[in-house]
Image (tube, helix red, strand yellow):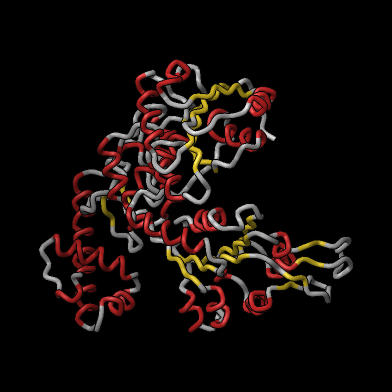
Amino acid sequence: MAKLNKISVLWIDQQATLTDEQTASFAERGIAIQCAASAEEAEQAFVTAQAIVVNLNQCTGLLKQVQLTKTSANATAPIIARVQRDNFELGIQAMSEGALNVVPADQFSVDDWIESLSTIDISVDKQTHSFVFADPVSRNLLALAERVAQVDVTVLLTGPTGVGKEVLARILHDASPRYEGPFIAFNCAAMPENLIEDMLFGHEKGSFTGATKVQPGLFEQAQGGTIFLDEIGEMSFHLQAKLLRILQERSVVRLGGQKAIDLDIRVIAATNRNLKNAIAQRTFREDLYFRLSAFKLSLPPLRERPLDILPLVEQFTAQQSSDGQPVRLTSEAQQMLSNYPWPGNVRELQNVILRAMVLAHQMPIDTQHLIFDDMPVTEEQHAPYKTEPFFVDQDSAMFSHDGSSQQPYFTENTGGAATATATGLNQAVKNSECQTIMAALRSSRSRDQAAEKLGISPRTLRHKLQKLREQGVSVTRAYAR
């Protein structure tokens, strides 16, 4: 249990207030509560408050009033919004408008509030929220997820690595009638097959050497709640058959056991693989696919929801800063972050921001502090990192953050002749690449087929065709989209 030391909390609620008994319970745990019905009524308390709790009804109007009063009082306390559990959209809106955290309005347990406060401010044990719903694409996904959460169906989450599939799985659990039950997450690619089988199904005492006691599996541990099976596409064909049986019969038999144990669980699976291709290659069962995909949600990569990028940056910097406040970014740095394609998605963005905060050293983050994961780094590239950051696509063509072609960066002064040679070689490589691409397009029926011949993804081919058009190369209209 987290322990807090004499924290002052301003509790604003227009409809109700805490009872004397509840206030006393908080005081016994070191939390001094001051209740108010409006922001104006408690204006003086903003200066000393270390956290502000606001109860939102149907809109964020009260939150905006609190923020205005907080600004005029020059206060810095984080805001916690209380929202009805079934009004998930209001909670997301509150976070996008400045609330640092959202908790259910029916959460009155002192122990629960101790945990909430310990993750927000005031202590170093901060919670990570790695998914932001600011972009219209993300908001549409959230609205659909809310509807799916209310129906007890098996859900398959698809999308590239690092987009937040586990976060969305938790949202599906929290917004569902099973929210009070356990949420059990398991990565199907993390362990050998025999260990996975034991962990998922459990075992009876004496079922194998070392089985000295009965061990319930993760399916049993998820009773009344949700089990999340990540990287389901990596599960062995043998285990897929057993999983299919569990989904069909809603019961599990422990290793070494004979009795079927009925299950009351919701199954959410996730993968970054194309399972239809895996079915064609006979590495994934078709019947299991249809069992898992009763409802399928596809999470778009970060580049397809660009309006999420800067809110995520603000969130990451606030989580890592000592005062809980976001770190300022220059407009050039914001532009660079928005233009970068983020092949590693949210996970890569978090890494880049953490590096930038270290390099900026409590100063505003600028372009020289942004070091992308696939940037070529040499021994002589140390702080203050004055070179222009580059990213390299999967075919090793080098571009700057704005997409324009660049000359290679040399850490040693090799002289003009060497530079000219490198420049000529670079141009020759570009010409050869252009000829190869055009030949593949002329001999292919579609862009996807051309990309397959070239050994690159269709997205990379689109990127290269765009570069060719910018250089004045005529590209067949069918391939220019």
Q: Is residue 84 above or below residue 278?
A: above
Q: Is residue 126 left or right of residue 254?
A: left
Expressed as whole percent of the image width and height from the top left, the position of residue 22 reads: 65, 29
Between 46 and 416, the one nearer to me in the picture: 46
Q: Is residue 465 above or below residue 284?
A: above
Between 362 and 147, the one nearer to me in the picture: 147
Between 145 and 189, the one nearer to me in the picture: 145
Which quadrant of the view contains residue 458?
bottom left
Q: Is residue 94 left or right of residue 459?
A: right
Q: Is residue 238 above or below residue 227?
A: below
Expressed as whole percent of the image width and height from the top left, the position of residue 199 reads: 72, 63
Q: Write the residue at 37% across / 43% down.
A: 311
* One can see residue 227 in this view: yes
Q: Write the residue at 34% across / 31% down.
A: 328
Q: Write the residue at 44% across / 56% down.
A: 163
Expressed as whole percent of the image width and height from the top left, the position of residue 61 reads: 37, 36
Expressed as whole percent of the image width and height from the top left, the position of residue 82 reads: 51, 39
Q: In this view, does 476 lie to the left or right of 453?
A: left
* One can see residue 354 in this view: no
Between 287 and 417, the one nearer to me in the picture: 287
In the image as oriented, which residue stretches furthest toward the front?
A: 15
Which quadrant of the view contains residue 190?
bottom right
Q: Write the residue at 62% across / 60% down.
A: 226
Q: Is residue 233 above or below residue 117?
A: below
Quarter in which the N terminus is drawn: top right
Q: In this view, does 238 lie to the left or right of 456?
A: right
Q: How many callouts does the rendering have? A: 0
Quarter in which the C terminus is drawn: bottom left
